[in-house]
Image (spheres, grey):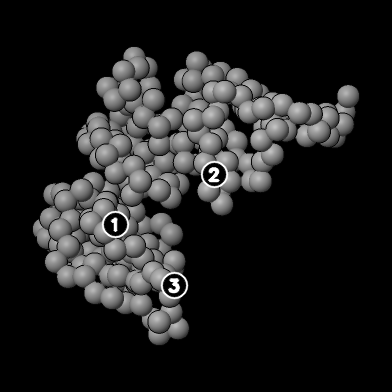
Amino acid sequence: MDVTARVNELMARQEPLLPELEPYVDRSPLGWLLPYVTEIGLDRSRCALVNDRYRRTAERVRQHFEAEEFPSYIFAHERPHRLLAFIRCLPGLAGCTKGLVGADFGRVLRDVWLDCENVRQNRRLWRDVWRHDAEGRQHCMTAEERAALAAQPDRFIVWRGVSYFSSASINGFSWTLDRDKAIWFARRHCSKRRRAWLAEGSVAKKDVLAHFLGRSEQEIVSLKVYPRVIIDVTDDHNQ
């Protein structure tokens, strides 16, 4: 049976979702965010194709972990599940005896952090990760980024833009040196029902965990930024 025929047969077959996938089902409009596959508009009575994809990918994931190919293991997961996959590769956090240590930890930390889009929903886990292996963590930055951080004063101003006003949103871990970029983030998802908020905070250089220069964001990562001013920056066309 060729690939096209195989896919058509799986799509037509009546089969329930595998029981081990049920806890991961996200019924939001974003689709079904399972560990290794994402489906939109899935028919609960015809899950043969997604089950097949899951089984195949799960086997590859297992092989990556056994071979200690940890970056491949992590990024075989769909984005919402990559943080937990990363933690499973960290001796001392997940109870595993092998995994990412030293410079390898730092380099993969960079990739997972910059890829993540739901930091706020996993604050406790990210706090544990950023406190893990302080020496190895330094390797999440390039030489240029370490030099840029070293050039900052002992205490400096940072900014954070959000479109959801809450303590967790305002007191986030990701800030920027660029006020305009923070305003852009604040306005990115604002609407008539969601206003744009800009927080100004102060951070000690010794409390900065990372400084990332990529994506023109001038990002500062710290668990100890304390907002001192919060203003509404909703632009006129959203009011």
* Residue type beneath disc 1: Ser
Query: Is residue 105 among what the camera can see?
Result: yes
| Mark 3 vs 1, N-terminal side | 1
Which numbered marker is on residue 8? none
Which numbered marker is on residue 27? 2
**Mark 2 secondary-structure assignment:** loop
| Mark 2 vs 3, N-terminal side | 2
Q: Residues within 10 Å of mark 3 (few under 14, many from 20)?
A: some
Q: Name the residue under label 1.
A: 169
| Rendered-image quadrant of the N terminus | top right
Query: Residue 148, located in which quarter of the rendered image?
Result: bottom left
7 or 130: nearer the eye? 7
Position of residue 51 in the picture relative to residue 73 (left or right): right
Q: How crowded is mark 2: few (under 14 residues within 10 Å), some or many (20 or more)?
A: few
Marks 2/3: CA–CA distance: 23 Å
Which numbered marker is on residue 191? 3
**Mark 1 secondary-structure assignment:** helix
Residue at left offset 24%, top offset 31%: 133
Marks 1/2: CA–CA distance: 24 Å
Q: Where residue 153 sits: x, y (%)?
A: 14, 61
* Residue type beneath disc 2: Arg
Position of residue 50 in the picture relative to residue 220 (left or right): right
Q: Where residue 173 sits: x, y (%)?
A: 27, 51
